[in-house]
Amino acid sequence: MSNSKTNMRKQILPIILLLIVLAGAGYGIKEYIYSLSHESTDDAQVDGDISPVSARVSGYIDQIRFVENHPVSKGDTLVKIDDRDLALRVLQAEAALENAIANVSVVKANVTTSEASVKAAQGNVDNAKVRLWKSTQDFDRYDKLLADKSITQAQYDAAKAEKLSAETSVSTAEKQLEASRAQLVAAQQQIAVAESQVKAREADLSTAKLQLSYTIITSPATGIASKKNIQLGQLVQPGQVLLSVVTDSNAYIVANFKETQLEKMTVGQPVEVKIDAFPEEKITGTVYTFSAATGARFSLLPPDNATGNFVKVIQRVPVKIAMQVPKEIATKLRPGMSAKVTVQIK
């Protein structure tokens, strides 16, 4: 009886080993065939659009109107900076603009006055010329009468003096007319200067109002407000990041494939995605874009193979994968989650 059991075991053991070898060979063949039409990597993460929210003016934080890690909508007011200084600048700019506008009125009034002065000077020239004409006529008559001894020398001298005086008056009036015209030209030029000052003050006012509007910081997108870096009363500077808004849509995968895996990979190929946080969920996607350079080239300190310490290392290229995510987990995805990606290349 004992011998029969021993013989049976000796017969079953090779069969079991054969089955194990066949199963292993079958699995290996299956994986090999699968690998011919698929490329996989577990160096992949969920990614999304993260919008940093920065201050555009300096000032003290007056209000914080969001709760960290809570949803916000595009356009919601997140932070308010104390605006009293900038509000005063707006008032100053408005006063400067009013002063510039009033100056234009004054300059235009000066032009009107200068035009009147030109007309008056022209009248004086005309009157002086009439006087010169009359005195010239009188002098010519007295000159003839003096030759006939019909008038005295004193009368002749008086007519001559009147003529000389009239000539001087014409010259003086013409010079005054030229001066008045020059003043008119200068006044007209001042209009352009004054109007340009108005435009400059309008620009100053627009800038002041724009700076004032920057004290109200709104959400650039709909998502979740995160990474809060401010407190009430804190002094912030232009460009300082106050928080970040992680958009709640357009989540995608960035998979870092080896360069040797990209030969047959093209845009539009179907992709199977398994996210570590949701291992039972079946998520599909497509190859969307390929990075323009390897991840190492985009690093803070890219390697320099010309240093003499060259060691060939297979590089990885980031590939963006667009996903079709079920609604029940779409809101649970977070940038940075690990994933495994398999691309069907045939």
Image: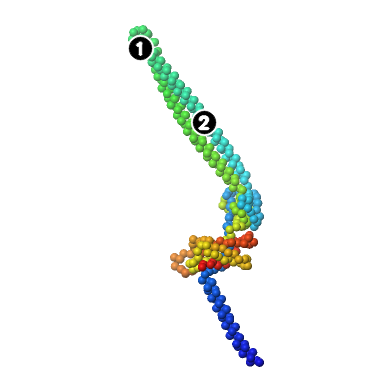
**Secondary structure state at the residue bearing disc 1:** helix
Name the residue: 49% across, 27% down.
114
Residue at x 62% of width, y 87% of height: 9
> Which quadrant would the N terminus be assigned to in this image?
bottom right
Crowding near the residue tagged with mark 1, few <14, some 14–19, many ≥20 C-alpha atoms within 10 Å: some
| Viewer-side residue, 265 vs 155 | 265
Q: In front: 235, or 52?
A: 52
Colouring chosen for the image of the structure: rainbow
Q: Position of residue 139 (x, y in %)?
A: 38, 13
Q: Amino acid at mark 2?
A: Lys
Dot placed on the residue nearer the N-terminal end, 2 or 1: 2
Which of the numbered marks, if any, corresponds to residue 172?
none
Q: Residues within 10 Å of mark 2 (few under 14, many from 20)?
A: some
Q: CA distance from mark 2 to mark 1?
A: 52 Å
Kindly identify which numbered label has been placed on residue 143.
1
For marks 2 and 1, give the one nearer the viewer.
Answer: 2
Q: Residue at x 48, y 31 (%)?
A: 187
In the displayed structure, 85 sits above or below 42; it is above
One can see residue 133 in this view: yes
Towards the viewer: 258 or 305: 258
Q: Position of residue 316 (x, y in %)?
A: 51, 66
* Tally of numbered tags: 2
Residue 97, image quadrant: top right
On screen, residue 223 versus residue 143, left or right, reads: right
Q: Vertical placement of 121 versus 247: above or below?
A: above
Q: Residue 30: name its quadrant.
A: bottom right
From what the image shows, is residue 57 above or below residue 1?
A: above
Q: Residue 120, how many percent across, how many down?
A: 47, 23
* Residue 61 appears in the picture as rendered: no
Tell me where residue 27 appears, x and y as whole percent: 56, 76
**Which of the labelled discs sits on residue 108, or is there none?**
2
